[in-house]
Image (tube, rainbow, N blue to C red):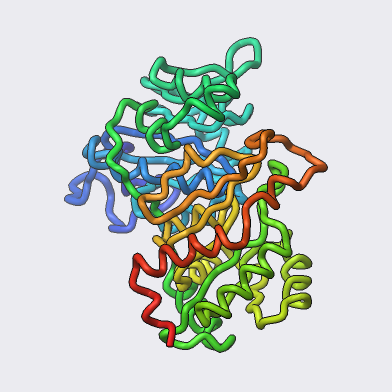
Amino acid sequence: MLLKLDCRYYKGEKSCKFNQLCEGCGFYEPMGKRVLIIKLGATGDVLRTTPLLKPLREKYMPSHITWLVDKNSAEALKGNLFIDKLLVFDAESLAGLMVERFDMVINFDKAYKAAAIAEQVNGKGKYGFGLSQYGTIYPLNKESDYTFSLGLSDELKFKKNKKTYQEMLFESVCMGYNKEEYILNVPEDDALWAENYLKSQGVEKGDLLIGLNTGGGDIFANKGWYEKGFLGLAELCVKNLNAKLVLLGGHQEIEKNERLCKNSKIPLINSGNNTLGRFAGIVKQCDTVVSGDTLAMHIAIAVKTPVVALFFSTCPQEIEFYDRGMALSASVECAPCYKRNCDRDDCIKDISVEKVYNGIEYFLKRNSKLQKVG
């Protein structure tokens, strides 16, 4: 029996979409170069790795790209036309990967389990990070040495490095970087939901809409701005721009955003806790977004909404804004620190309301959005 196991349409457990046997089939299309990308999380990091997909596809024709991701970040990759197989990290996926063979294995995730998979999987060429026989993470190829060294030297990461994450990613896989964009598929129904939701909240065509992302995640301390800062900024945006403000966040910001609405002197739209698609749909409707160094910032970059990004405990150098973002960094002596916990709040109060407002106004003027103000 003739079986073309390397055909990108072949399934084995059931018929292919053409419902034909391999012998005599005119739709045979070999997978070509097989690529495995391991980037499990966090979701923002997953998103900022997507610029690699299109150049990989263009460089290796034909090719078949598999991406291994954590369940919590998988939604960011759904509908991505450059991914042939999306695998969610679980026992079944790992069992399959131990059998499959790849021409290229890319792991840009320093997590222990990600490095272990990269080390064990069958691959002719490996890039990024692996796991040694001593249970320690190390660079798989010399082109990944620089990126790896950032995690070992605060001096290099905090002060000397000027490269963005994407520059280092492309460098690690021996490819030239030409400011390739993020790839995020926002389903049509999610985009329509966001548009209708904002209409139901009184946002009309022609209104200036500013998104305020109030969270900062829970990996590093002090990645979100302080509440009085958001309240003062909202008042300034209404007073000077006649803008409407929508609060953005996830399940961790539910209470915070309810509190902001209660304490605000002006009306705020509390968008609640949404799916990633609906969240991205709302961000896409905004004229500008204010966010800490977190997922909302990456989504704004992906949907091409200008973003004023606030950095307290982390570094702005590694973020690629594509000339649609502005990084405002705390100037206190201890920042950046990348601490997991901190009982100080001087860094989050170091960036003034006026400075953030000026960033918003800059993008509105540059994009000719201030003409909306009557």
Q: Quadrant of residue 112?
A: top right
255 displayed left or right of 40: right
Quadrant holding the C terminus: bottom left
**Residue 153 position in % (x across, y down):** 58, 20
106 w.r.t. 306: above or below: above
Residue that sits furthest to the top in the current view: 134
**Closer to the camera in the image, 235 or 54:** 235
**Closer to the camera in the image, 325 or 186:** 325
**Closer to the camera in the image, 181 or 317:** 317
Residue occupying the point 41% across, 49% down = 321
**Closer to the camera in the image, 96 or 108:** 108
**Residue 70 position in % (x across, y down):** 59, 44
Residue occupying the point 58% across, 24% down = 151
Residue occupying the point 27% across, 54% down = 20
Counting every numbered tag in the picture gives: 0
53 w.r.t. 333: above or below: below
184 displayed left or right of 155: left
**Residue 115 position in % (x across, y down):** 56, 25
Residue occupying the point 65% across, 16% down = 135
**Residue 271 position in % (x across, y down):** 63, 74
Q: Is residue 3 visible?
A: no
Residue that sits furthest to the right in the current view: 343
Quadrant holding the N terminus: top left
Q: Is residue 137 visible?
A: yes
